[in-house]
Amino acid sequence: MTTAIIGLGNMGSGLARRLAGNGNLVLAARNEAAATTLAQDIGAKSASVDAAIAAADTVILALPYDAALALAKSGALDGKVVVDISNPVKPDFSGLAFGFDTSAAEEIQKAAPGAKVVKAFNTIFASLFAAPRDNTANVPVFLAGEDAALEKVETLVKNAGFAVEKTGTLDAARLLEPLGMLNIRFGYGLGRGTSIAPAWLSV
Ligand SMILES: NC(=O)c1ccc[n+]([C@@H]2O[C@H](COP(=O)([O-])OP(=O)(O)OC[C@H]3O[C@@H](n4cnc5c(N)ncnc54)[C@H](OP(=O)(O)O)[C@@H]3O)[C@@H](O)[C@H]2O)c1
């Protein structure tokens, strides 16, 4: 499996560090020099955005939602398993830009019908990637998606050092994106900090 990470900000670089050494990893960002530096640091490859996508079977869009949607519309993601991690938060952080009857993941899927989109990682803060792996082994990463694409992303989540919590087909992203927003509210608005993450209990 070759995984491309597009966008190397807080989430993309954290995921890259967690995934380094697990199969082929190609890093790409609009700042190609930054991608090269990080790739050398962690023993991954780097490439242009187009070349990284072409080389990969699984593409993680570690981008703001608008940039992820634009890439989906370009046709570059056709035939790929696409991991959408976005929370489509309004610029003033007052809430989500949309929800209830669609989701960022479903909009990306509509824009790239030749891809298979899976929602993942949107309910955890980037700071968790810097924690010791043992600390995150039981932290759930909620997945929405199906079939072989879901199986690939399950493997990826485990390789990144997290637990898998499957929520059903991609429309479950309508629920996961508000959950991500709630986590942001806990972390920032309610002052709980960015080491928290939601989990479901069975009692
Ligand atoms: N941060 C979190 O804790 C967290 C948690 C859950 C989900 N998420 C989601 O994860 C995604 C990434 O968040 P982040 O915190 O990693 O953001 P970030 O630190 O701002 O990094 C965003 C990355 O996207 C690139 N980018 C921005 N606009 C772009 C454009 N128009 N075209 C191409 N590349 C563009 C940036 O490139 P430059 O460096 O060149 O600007 C950077 O590499 C977002 O959708 C966010 O909602 C974040």
Image: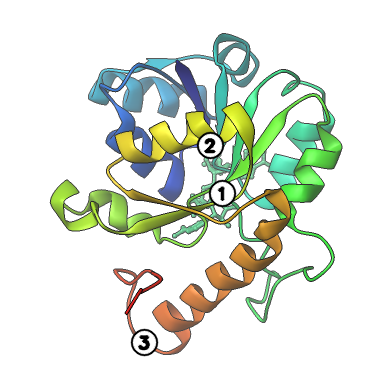
The kind of residue on which mark 3 rests is: Gly
The residue that label 3 is drawn on is 191
Q: Quadrant of residue 194?
A: bottom left
CB at mark 2 closer than 8 A to ligand 1? yes
Sequence order check, earlier mark of 2 and 1: 2
Rate crowding at label 2 as few (under 14), some (14 to 19) or many (20 or more) other CA atoms within 10 Å.
many
The kind of residue on which mark 1 rests is: Ile
Sequence order check, earlier mark of 1 and 3: 1
Residue 175 horizontal/vertical position (percent): 65, 67
Residue at image point 47% right, 22% down: 3
Visible residue check, residue 30: no
Q: Is residue 51 left or right of residue 195?
A: right
CB at mark 1 closer than 8 A to ligand 1? yes
Q: Nearer the viewer, mark 2 or mark 1?
A: 1
Position of the C terminus, as image quadrant, is: bottom left
Sequence order check, earlier mark of 2 and 3: 2
